[in-house]
Image (spheres, rainbow, N blue to C red):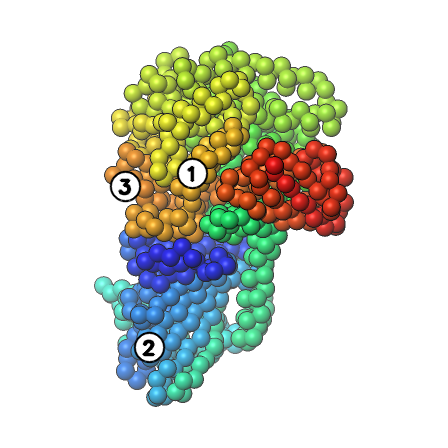
Amino acid sequence: MFLCKYGYFSDDGYEYVITNPKTPKPWSNVISNGNYSILITQTGGGYSWGKNSIENRITRFVQDSVKDDFGKYIYIRDDDTGEIWGTTYKPTEKCGDDYKVIHGLGYSIFIHTYNEIESNLKVFLSKDDKMEFFYIILKNKSKRFRRLSVFFCAELYLSNFPEENREFDKLFMETDFDENLNVLIGKKSFWSVIDKNGNCNNREYKYLFFMGSTEKIISYETSREKFIGMYNSFKNPESLKNILLSNTVGKNLDAISCIHNRIELNSYESKNFSFHMGICESYDEVLNISNKYKNISNVDEEFIRFKNFVREFIDDEKINTPDIGINFMTNIWCKYQTIMCRFFSKASYYQNNKGIGYRDHLQDSLIFLTSKEDIIRNQILYQASMQFKNGKVVHFFLDESKFFIETNSSDDNLWLVYISLIYIKESNDIDILDCKVKYIDFNEEEELYFHLKNSIEYSLGNISSRGLSFMLNHDWNDAISNFNGESIFVSEFLYLVLKEFIEICEIKNDYDFLKKIENYMRIIKNGVNNFGFYKSWYLRGVSDDITLGSVDCEYGKIFLLPQAFAIISGIIDDENKIKVMDEVYKHLNTKYGLKILTPPYSKTNKKIGYITRYAEGTRENGSIYYHSCMWGILAFIMVNKIDIAKEIIHNILPPNKSKEIDLYKIEPYVMPSSVDGDYSKNFGMGNWSFNTGSSVWFHRIITNFIIGVRGTLKGLLIDPKPFSLWKKFSISRKYRNARFNIKFENNNGRNLEIFVDGYKIEGNLITNVESGRVYNVKVVIK
């Protein structure tokens, strides 16, 4: 499916098969269990980390999308001839013509035949332990007996990122080999992550690194200098010319971890064995893990456990439409990308030093609404604890140390409210409002309801005399980083949050706050439409000396975000809805999707921010920025411009990029952060795959607004807005612990007939949902 010169989707969409290791950019897989994560590319490149890739980087990695030459590698040596190759294309750059990589959900498989030895390498994680497996099947396809040595190596980091002073770093490293456990162990006496008592530098790395095998380790190496050889490289390490590794361990080493197995194969015989590596918090834990996985059968079982763990997040909800690409992305890859990369691992190839972005992680948690509601519930409460008493929240924090960065963003605090409201509507979990949570700067706990009110109060306290929200240091677009004025987008978003919060005030009988909300809604609506609308569209920002997003501007005449959120929030007058979205289509639409703004800035302006420093047509300066593009699609749907929404979706859909893959360059199975806009010399080139909030919003748009099934406080709303050619489509999903199997028949009308278990209901809201029940629903659009 969706064949290109470098690969294709499997028929069921659950795997992407790469048939040529020389893809235009590294094509990766991100795999995580929430506490341990890896990235692996089609060449074998990549790295490993713990809870986040800043504080607990386990293996060394340098982001280089040209060479892609940092990874954890397995070498194979023919002990009779001395020839060396590997299970992956890198680092030896030798592979058979049958080289194939399968990126699946929670695993990557590398298969090829070289020197008449077929190797099958499967890389995956443990479900519960902080470790990864390299499961190997070697088959002798020759007619002669083969004596092979197999080496597994990883360059150790065991530090917070960045720590690139190797000569300093190695002073704290120590390695040892435990013959009884058959493992190589690494530890470090220095870690500059701040602990809960504020200690920094004067503390040890709290984990033990371990590397082992199901086969007996016959030699090992922890000196990088001895392994590679001076002025040499991983392509042809000096130590592999010797029968055995040097067994060097100890302190003050530029550390590598390499272990050596010997495998003997008769003609056409196969052998299964596995390497593993990871981190533990104690020697006893290393002991338990070593005993647990010393048998290959236990590793087989762990693969099944981890694969099932991943699929639990994917398979609870499923759509079926005539568009296979939409099915693949909605059912599988957008969920996988959001959960594995954005939520669990928080890192990727192109953003390899990430923690928890306050607004981003809350949005990403929406992916769990139909699979694991407890995760989004816990995330809301967790992030409420990263709030100040005055309602302001941190912008970014790390989950190992709770270190945070406070930037005084004007929208971060509102996402806590907005995501909480969506969760409550879906789950009917009103009790979450009574859960008590501490603040960062206030030791006493308060109910979540007051945290949400404080978030709103903080924004209401930053309203200008024009009735608009101050941008403060920045808003959703972090790159507008020095604008001393008001944000039309934040004003619209605040209006939306206030409107949605009214139901919560009614539930809590908080009518004084409800009246306050309604009063501010009038003020903000007047401000946005009187001061934020100019000629044909909404401005991006206003101040006493600079206007953003005006037709009179030299650069950035029109921005997508304020137009989209005028529609999404409902702040726009009805007579202007179509006019504004027509301007969006006229000025911002391209054959590759909606641009974030146009024309891009080509002169720097310190009064606006670093958005003006990007190259034209890239990132926030005029690219097809997928996160904002999703909100543009949603706005077109909400004004019933379904054909335009369909056109844009078709143009941005990654599987459809297979037709122009050498232009697009990056993975056609996950959403990118952006695609270069029409002012870039690389118009149409994809950028920064995997780590983007667009994946959760694409999933939400398809399921909640095109198929049109979403939760409200009163029940499950059926509000389909399908493409005209979708004559039949369906969705199966959970809602309030009940299963809904919903089938649609589309006759391209505007009226709905809804039958629940054969009985026609009035309206389009399914109420009185019984927990544990299965509902079969038929929807006729006529």
Percent position (x, y) of residue 449?
Answer: 68, 30
Q: Between tags 2 and 1, which lies in front?
A: 1
Q: Identify which residue is drawn at 42% across, 72% down.
A: 120
Viewer-nearest residue: 179 or 127: 127
Percent position (x, y) of residue 325?
Answer: 46, 50
Viewer-nearest residue: 468 or 560: 560
Q: Are marks 2 and 1 in contact (CB under 8 Å)?
A: no
Q: Identify which residue is drawn at 30% across, 59% down.
A: 22
Question: Label 2 vs label 3: CA separation?
Answer: 42 Å
Position of the N terminus, as image quadrant, is bottom left
Badge 1 amino acid: Glu
User: In this view, which residue lies farthest toward the left?
Assistant: 231
Q: Residues within 10 Å of mark 3 (few under 14, many from 20)?
A: some
Q: Which residue is mark 2?
A: 77
Q: Which residue is mark 3?
A: 682
Q: With respect to residue 300, does 410 lie above or below?
A: above
Badge 2 amino acid: Arg
Sequence-wise, the earlier of marks 3 and 1 is 1
Q: Which residue is mark 1?
A: 647
Badge 3 amino acid: Asn
Percent position (x, y) of residue 561?
Answer: 45, 28
